[in-house]
Amino acid sequence: MTGKVYLIGAGPGDPDLLTMKAHRLLTAADVVLYDRLVGEQIIAMIPATAEKLYVGKAKSLHSLPQEEINALLATKAKEGKVVVRLKGGDPFIFGRGGEELEELVQEGVPFEVVPGVTAAAGCAAYAGIPLTHRDYAQSVRFLTGHLKDGTTELPWNELVHPAQTLVIYMGLTGLESISQSLIRFGMRPSMPVAIVEKGTSKDQRVFTSTIKDIHQIALQNEVKSPALLIIGEVVALQDKLSWFGKSCLIEQKGS
C-alpha cells in the first residue's frame, strides 16, 4: 500500500506560528524529512517513534542533493508510510516545494500541501515593518538573492519603484552587489532598508539603515543567515511599530 507525502511549511521559526493542520500531521508522521531552517522547538514536536531525516542545505553545503531528497520522499511513501516533508517558511516560496512534488507526480505518489507563514510575512511582522501601507507602498515583491546559477542578476530596472517594498530572501551573501545595483539603476542612496536576522525567534535582531550603508552595517554587526532583507519606505515605520524583543531591535543606524 502506498503511503502519502505531506509537504508542510513550518513557518519562519516561532513554533506558535505553526498551523493547526501542520501540527496535527507532524505529530502523526512515520517519517519526517526536515530542513536547516526549521526551528528546534518544532523539531522537538516530531514523535519519538518517527524516523527523522535531516536534509538541510546551507550555502555550498548540502547534506543531500535535491534529486536524492525527491527520490527519498517517493521511496518512503511507497513503503506505505506517512511522510512529512518539513520546510522552513512556506514550501512554495523559495522552498523548492514544486520540484519535489513534480517527482511525486511522476512516481504516482499521493500528496498534500500545507502552507506555512513565509519569512517575508513573519519576519516583517515581528520586526514591526508593514510590507504594504497606503501612505508608503501599494505593492510588495518577493525575490531571491541567490539564483540557481549562483549570481544575483535580478531585473533591476523593474525593482526601483517609489511605492514598492522589496523583500529579498537569501540576500546576505550578495548584499553589497544588490545594494550597488539598485543604486546604479536609480534607487536613491538614502532608501530605508532593514535586515531581520533569525526573525521570529528569541535571537531575532533587526538592523535598519540605508541602501548605501546597509552592507557596512551588516559587516560591523557580523550578521549571519538566516536573514531577510526589506527595502522600501515602510522600513521607516519600524522604530515606531516594533514590538517583539523591543529592547534589542535597533542595533545601529547608518547615515
Image: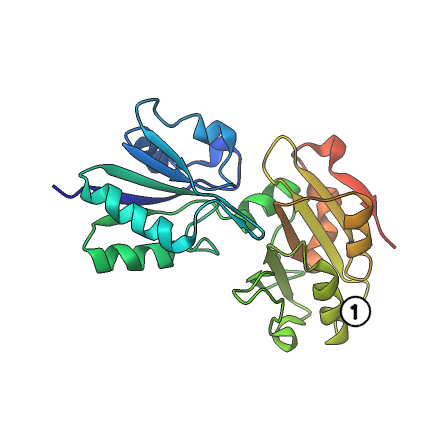
Q: Which residue is mark 1?
A: 188
Locate the C terminus and report the quarter of the image it occupies. bottom right
Q: Write the residue at 29% across / 57% down.
A: 103
Q: State how the image is colored.
A: rainbow
Foreground pick, 121 / 83: 83
Q: Write the residue at 42% across / 56% down.
A: 96
Foreground pick, 219 / 55: 55
Locate the N terminus and report the quarter of the image it occupies. top left
Residue type at mark 1? Answer: Arg
Q: Write the residue at 20% across / 50% down.
A: 110
Relative to 182, say whether 40 is above or below: above
Residue 121 x/y as whole percent: 54, 48
Residue furthest to the right: 255
Residue 87 x/y as whole percent: 43, 44
Residue 35 x/y as whole percent: 46, 42
Residue 39 x/y as whole percent: 51, 34
Relative to 222, say whether 93 is above or below: below
Relative to 149, say whether 206 is above or below: above
In the rendered structure, the answer to whether residue 47 lies left or right of residue 241 reads: left
- Disc 1 on helix, strand or loop? loop
Crowd rating for badge 1 (residues with CA inside 10 Å; few <14, some 14–19, many 20+): some
Relative to 162, say whether 80 is above or below: above
Residue furthest to the top: 48
Foreground pick, 50 / 167: 50
Q: Write the residue at 67% across / 55% down.
A: 173
In the rendered structure, the answer to whether residue 110 lies left or right of residue 42 reads: left
In the rendered structure, the answer to whether residue 149 lies left or right of residue 218 reads: left
